[in-house]
Image: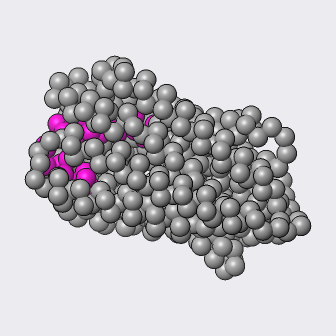
Amino acid sequence: MLHGNMSRKIIMFAIPLIASGILQQSFNAIDVAVVGRFSSSQALAAVGSTGVIISIMINLFLGISIGANVVISNYIGQNNADGIRKAIHTAVAVALISGVLLAVTGIIFARSILVLMNTPDDVIDLSAKYLKIFFLGMPFMMMYNFGAAILRSFGDTKRPFYSLVIAGIANTVLNLILVIYCGMSVEGVAIATVAANIINATFITRWLIREPAPYTLNVKRININGHELHKVLSIGIPAGLQGMVFSTANIFIQSTINEFGSTAIAGSAAALNYELYCYFIMVAFCQAAVAFVSQNYGAGLYDRCRKAVKICMLLSVISVGVANVIIVVFDHFFIGLFSTSPEVLHYAAIRLHTVLMFQFLASSYEICGAALRALGYSMTPTLLTIAGTCVLRLIWVYTVGEYSDDFALLLSIYPITWIITGTFVVTAYLKISRKVFAKAPQPV
């Protein structure tokens, strides 16, 4: 990451990440598709409506995994082997602890959260069943995500992708067997997803154990180093809080969507899968920005830091924008993969044309926010994103959402907040980076 053609290296870094994100999202998408095609609209709504709940509960710890990525990448830029070892073992300890906490919390509070979200009576029992089984796999999901972040810190994005390919195949096969041949509904797809997470965690752990020094994971040395934990949390917690607050705002929007009935929930859930697919393209370039900027910043190569941000921004806008347009143009084909119900197709098409079409705009604050975290300014993009996105969405829900029954109008807040938040975060990045890069780089 410190030498050579940066554009080519960023693309090669991002492609496995894009494929990995799409495969990981496919676990939920396949769940939605299988129950939508072979079970019922209520089962489709039950699985699809749980996405925001899952997001809010795991986003804090996924943010912390970003902190681990930044810290390890920075140590690599500084050639600090002892720091790399301590950070890796601390990150794995946090992954295991957070996975257990999420499993317990999710199982206990699943139904209570669904009640607060105004989940319809014909959906809530199925949703609660799906969530409780899903959260049993949290320790394995956290181990995979933290392990993948460790591998990405030194440029390896291919092996997490290989793991997801195998787990994705297993997930699909188990879905079809449990739902079609065993007659299960949401419990079948939840069990398949847990099995896929176990496969992912197994592969990642095995690879880390076999890594050469200083990247080797020694199971006996897994512990929390206070100094490394502080560094990881100072970057990771703001990123995680942003994701949690972001998901909280989306829960309020989902609650309003729930008031339109189970067909609107099912249609929105089907369309949301494509938003998440495109979002993972964006996330891949965010991860590239984090890795390339943090390593080059650690090595004092400021010009390469600036160049990395520009390249990641351009690639994200173009690739996400192209994907957005293709899905919207062929909307009936893509929505038809999830449901054949005309009512479900109607609501899904509205969401695609109102939200997905403009999703590329979010690249502005996502890429610049990733760059700021790589420079050690993690709280700044968090506060700006909360103000520009989350607060405005909550205001929209309690004004427009309260007094209007227009589904498209409710969803139009997404592109509005992307523009506003993008303006905030891009401006902050330009000001902060100018100040940071004006300092003389420290010798490594």
- Write down the quadrant of residue 80 in the picture: bottom right
Query: 11 above or below 243?
Result: above
Query: 95 above or below 23?
Result: below
Q: Which residue is more in the foreground, 309 or 105?
A: 309
Percent across and percent down for residue 283 are 54, 46
Q: Which residue is more in the foreground, 294 or 142?
A: 294
The residue at 46%/46% (across/down) is 362
Task: Tell which residue pokes out farthest to the right in this image.
Answer: 443
The residue at 61%/58% (across/down) is 430
Question: Does residue 349 appear anywhere in the picture?
Answer: yes
The residue at 23%/23% (across/down) is 340
Q: Coloured how?
A: one colour
- Write down the quadrant of residue 82 in the picture: bottom right
How many numbered badges does the structure rendering display? 0
- Residue 272 highlighted magenta (yes or no): yes
- Residue 402 highlighted magenta (yes or no): no
The magenta stretch spans which residues?
Answer: 251-277
Percent across and percent down for residue 184 are 28, 37
Query: 172 above or below 64?
Result: above
Percent across and percent down for residue 322 are 49, 28
